[in-house]
Image (cartoon, rainbow, N blue to C red):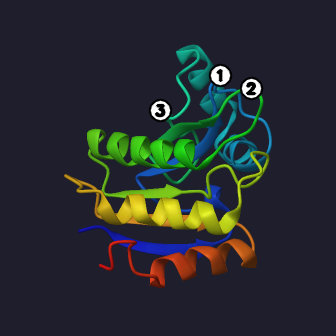
Amino acid sequence: MLRLEVREGDIAAIEADAIANAANDRLWMGAGVAGALKRAGGDEIEQEAMAIGGIPIGTAVATTAGRLRARWVIHGAVMGQDLRTDGDLVRRTTRACLELADELACRSLALPAFGTGVGGFRLADCAAIMVEEARIYEPSSLELVIFAVFGSEAYEAFSSALSSPLPDGS
């Protein structure tokens, strides 16, 4: 069973085996989480991602992490070029990041609040979906998921989701 926790602050400063990027399907790194990771980790993260090319929305790929305190950056394509997302894409992207972290034999993964910045997705809905996906996920190597969020509103939304029972009552 995964340990789940929420931390408020700069995701680029988190020490974890992998840090997820709230990416677009072309993998260019602009503002928000992507910008923070690129500034702290270096341009090589974006260069490596761009060399991969586009990926389908709702999937994820990994690059090295440059100067970050992580081994990998997992780019979860939660939105397309329109920079919009929805609950299904947040769910699929969360699952894709968890699965890829396991494939990479990671023990820890930091996830941002997917789609809540430029994507415009509601924080409470994002938190409920991401926490549910992490709770039902059955890991092979992954032991810890850190919801690395920015701001007190996001912290409260994820803390509330972590303390709520799953929809099935468990």
**x then y, percent, for residue 164:** 46, 82
Question: Of marks 2 and 1, which one's residue comes earlier in the chain?
Answer: 1
Q: Disc 2 or 3, which lies upstream in sequence?
A: 3
Q: x, y (%) of residue 161?
A: 52, 76
Q: Where residue 26 is drawn, which disc sits there?
A: 1
- Amino acid type indicated by mark 1: Arg
- Residue at position x 52%, y 54% in the image: 69
N-terminal-most mark, 1 or 3: 1
Q: Residue at x 71, y 67 (%)?
A: 150
Position of residue 13 measured from the top left corner of the image (x, y, whole percent): 62, 61
Disc 2 designates what residue?
Answer: 81
Q: Amino acid at mark 2?
A: Gln
Front position in the image: 110 or 15: 110
Observer able to see residue 15: no
| Nearer to the camera, 70 or 91 | 91
| Secondary element at tag 2 | loop
Towards the viewer: 28 or 58:
58
Mark 2 in CB contact with mark 1 (< 8 angstroms) = yes
Mark 1: give few (<14), some (14-19) or many (20+) Cα within 10 Å. some
Using the rendered view, name the quadrant where residue 75 is placed. Answer: top right
